[in-house]
Amino acid sequence: MLTSERYAAIAEQVAEACKQAGRNPEEVTIVAVSKTVGPAEVASAIEGGARDFGENRPDQLMVKADQFTDSTWHFIGNIQSRRIRDIVGRATLIHSLFEERHARKIDDVAREHGIVQDALIEVNVSGEHSKSGLAPADVRAMLDYCGGLQNLRICGLMTMAPLGDMQAARQAFEGLRELRDSLQSDYPDVRELSMGMTDDWPIAIEEGATIVRIGRAIFSDL
Ligand SMILES: *Cc1c(COP(=O)(O)O)cnc(C)c1O
């Protein structure tokens, strides 16, 4: 199958899963995670209807975002201070923010560019040591800190579920949704839930994901 066909098939499955869950498909954005492929595959996904793409390396984000300027680019990888300049502005949404010092630097660079940078707070819901992100109990303090930064807007939360255990994945997604709901009255901008990848996106949609990040199901034959 061509990448364009795989993307179109996934988009249809996502829309169907939304309907099954009683949700409007327009509430869910598919981020096509193109970190393992080159420009030809990105172009093919665009042909299949893809609008949003995700990258986890700043250098790849730079190359692809600067080439495909009509697409929306997301940064989903580990943030390093010295690469923040390459990310701010290029990424419409940064999914993986959890350190105050990075928030401060993103805010500084965004101010220089005269923009407000949108970002999500990465939360380690499952508490696995191998995972990055804030403990749920620390998210409020981070939101308060970011609230003092004029050129950074936190518009939601992101998590990575434990791999290979669908019950644990559901718990993590449910936990992220409950956390978002508990923050809504004090932080009305915190709406988005970025959760769900190739192996677990149907569960994430049932649990309220507004953004799913799908790589292998679009860009490989599995
Ligand atoms: C690679 C990656 C994905 C996509 O994973 P697949 O299993 O290929 O769908 C999603 N989110 C993050 C943060 C990633 O690094």
Image (cartoon, rainbow, N blue to C red):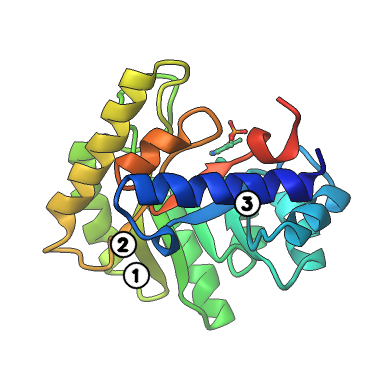
**Mark identifier at residue 146:** 2
| Residue type indicated by callout 3 | Arg
Q: Which quadrant is the N terminus positioned in?
A: top right
Categorize mark 2 by other alpha carbons within 10 Å: few (<14), some (14-19), many (20+): some
Pointer 2 or 3: first along the chain: 3
- Residue lying at 18% horizontally and 43% vertically, measured from the top left: 178
Residue toward you, 28 or 77: 28
- Secondary structure under the numbered disc 2 in the rendered image: helix
Considering every residue shown, the one lying at the far right of the view is: 40
- Going by the numbered disc 1, the residue's amino acid type is Leu
The local crowd at label 3, few if under 14, some if 14 to 19, many if 20 or more residues have their Cα within 10 Å, is few
Q: Tell me if label 1 and label 2 are in contact, CB under 8 Å.
A: yes
Where is residue 14 drawn, in percent x and y? 50, 47
> What residue appears at the point 49 percent right and 62 percent down from the top-left corner?
106
Estimate the spatial distance between the alpha carbons at disc 1 and disc 3, rounded to whole Å: 19 Å
Quadrant assignment for ligand 1:
top right
